[in-house]
């Protein structure tokens, strides 16, 4: 199946030459940082990192509907076909239109609420040790360190590991649906191009 993105018309020449992947961490604006940190720690190796993902759509119509890049005067969105060798990318497509609607968010928020009293009663020093869990861009190894040093983090991680459906319900083959779809270039040196349709 083909992938599509919609970009401002002013970027078409640049798109035809090619883009590299997202090199810096993309901080999520649609899900809590603690959820993003847990999802990244659970991510299977064959799935793309949301933090370095390029968002796409299975149809040109959905690409236009989901376009969000800023437009300058005289710009309009143009649907484009993603041109990239399939073996150079990892793809994931969710069953929900946006990760913000995934049931894991409620699952994790509910666990934190149920343990809110325990968290509130921690000393300032203990709260400071736990703070990275709720900050953007926590790496897997950093989460593992927290897991190994704090029983509440270990309990949360174990619970989410058992009950999370984010990655297990994601497809690594694009479907003809409006589920959020994203891909990541496997090698930093790889590029993808966009062709206007």
Image (spheres, grey):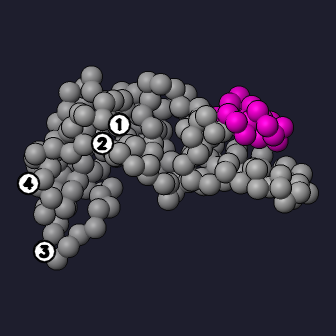
Frontmost of labels 3 and 1 is: 1
Specify few, some or many for label 3: CA neighbours under 10 Å numbering under 14, 14-19, or 20 or more.
few
**Front residue (pair 51, 175):** 51
Q: How far is the residue under mark 2 from the one under mark 4? A: 17 Å
- Dot 1 corresponds to which residue? 184
- Which quarter of the figure is the N terminus placed in? top left
Q: How far is the residue under mark 3 from the one under mark 2? A: 27 Å
Specify the segment rendered in magenta: 144-165
Q: Where on the picture, by quarter, is residue 187?
A: top left
Q: Could you tell me residue 175's position as x and y percent?
A: 35, 32
Of pointers 3 and 4, the one earlier in the residue sequence: 4
- Dot 3 corresponds to which residue? 74
Assess whether mark 4 and mark 2 are in contact (beta carbons under 8 angstroms).
no
Q: Residue at x 47, y 25 (%)?
A: 45
Assess whether mark 2 and mark 1 are in contact (beta carbons under 8 angstroms).
yes
Q: How far is the residue under mark 1 from the one under mark 2? A: 7 Å
- Which numbered marker is on residue 13? 4
Horizontal placement of 175 versus 95: left or right?
Answer: left
């Amino acid at each position: 199946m083909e992938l599509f993105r919609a970009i401002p018309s002013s970027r078409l020449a640049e798109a035809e030459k090619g883009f590299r992947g997202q090199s810096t961490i993309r901080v999520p604006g649609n899900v809590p940082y603690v959820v993003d940190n847990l999802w990244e720690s659970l991510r299977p190796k064959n799935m793309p990192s949301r933090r370095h993902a390029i968002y796409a759509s299975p149809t040109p119509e959905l690409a236009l509907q989901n376009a969000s890049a800023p437009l300058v005067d005289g710009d309009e969105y143009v649907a484009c076909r993603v041109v990239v060798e399939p073996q150079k990318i990892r793809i994931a497509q969710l069953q929900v239109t946006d990760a913000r609607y995934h049931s894991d968010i409620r699952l994790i928020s509910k666990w934190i609420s149920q343990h809110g009293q325990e968290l509130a009663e921690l000393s300032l020093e203990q709260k400071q040790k736990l703070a990275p869990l709720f900050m953007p861009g926590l790496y897997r190894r950093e989460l593992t360190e927290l897991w190994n040093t704090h029983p509440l983090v270990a309990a949360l991680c174990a619970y989410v590991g058992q009950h999370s459906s984010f990655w297990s319900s994601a497809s690594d083959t694009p479907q003809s649906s409006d589920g959020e779809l994203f891909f990541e270039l496997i090698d930093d040196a790889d590029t993808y191009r966009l062709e206007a349709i």
